[in-house]
Image (cartoon, grey):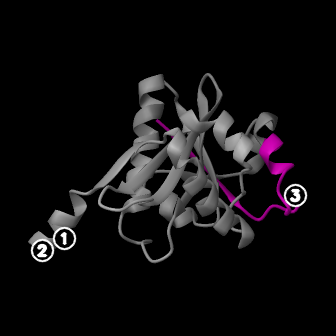
Amino acid sequence: MSDHDDNKQAYVVVRKAVMSDIHEIHRLLSFYGEKGVLLPRPLSELYDHMRDYFVVEDTRKKNGIQAVGGLGICWEDLAEIKSLAVLEGLQGKGIGSKLVNACLEEARFFGIKKIFALTYVPDFFTRFGFQEVSKSLLPQKIWADCLKCTKFPNCDEVAMLLNL
């Protein structure tokens, strides 16, 4: 990495989402939702669950949200990494990894022992120690989101689980 790259990285921060981020988050999730690779979230749900989300922001830019990801707590010992999305053109640069690490750090803070993700990119999650599991191992409560999906009941996502 050159000094120029180091300088760029100083402006890219991972932080908790705030109210002024919601429309950018909605736009990013809707983009991938229209492609069928992510469950789109209505604005009302994003406002209800805003505290679940982290963003990656380039602080040099207005509307500099580059990526989003959330940690949704399901039970006392189980949480989901959800809505992980990185702008096209910025994938493969470690931005998604920063979000996953932020979610895992928060899960540890709350004492959550198991984290799952439903994904089309299982190899990405394998790098963090996640292992593929049967969706039937996940509690029925998580399927509330699945009912909103256009692919339900023929889900083709892969369930990944990490024991912390």
Which comes before the other along the chain, label 2 or label 3? 2
Horizontal arrangement in the rendering, residue 136 relative to residue 60 (left or right): right
Relative image position of residue 100 (x, y in whole percent): 45, 49
Q: In which quarter of the image is residue 120?
A: bottom right
How dense is the environment of label 1, judged by Cα within 10 Å: few (below 14), some, or many (20 and up)? few
Residue contact between numbered discs 2 and 3, judged by CB atoms under 8 Å = no
Q: Is residue 127 visible in the rendered structure shown here?
A: no
Q: What element carries label 3?
A: loop
Separation of residues labelled 1 and 3 (CA atoms): 43 Å
Separation of residues labelled 2 and 3 (CA atoms): 46 Å
Q: What element carries label 1?
A: helix
* Residue 163 higher or lower than 66, as above or below: above
Q: Mark 2 points at which residue?
A: 2
Residue contact between numbered discs 2 and 1, judged by CB atoms under 8 Å = yes
Task: Tell me the residue at 55%/61% (across/down).
Answer: 85
Relative image position of residue 139 (x, y in whole percent): 76, 35
Horizontal arrangement in the rendering, residue 19 relative to residue 60 (left or right): right
Type of the residue with mark 1 = Asp
The magenta stretch spans which residues? 143-164
Relative image position of residue 63 (x, y in whole percent): 45, 59
Task: Tell me the residue at 49%/39% (across/down).
Answer: 18
Q: Name the residue under label 3.
A: 152
How dense is the environment of label 3, judged by Cα within 10 Å: few (below 14), some, or many (20 and up)? few
Q: Name the residue under label 1.
A: 5
Q: Does the magenta stretch include residue 93?
A: no
Horizontal arrangement in the rendering, residue 42 relative to residue 95 (left or right): right
Q: Quadrant of residue 65?
A: bottom left
Type of the residue with mark 3 = Phe
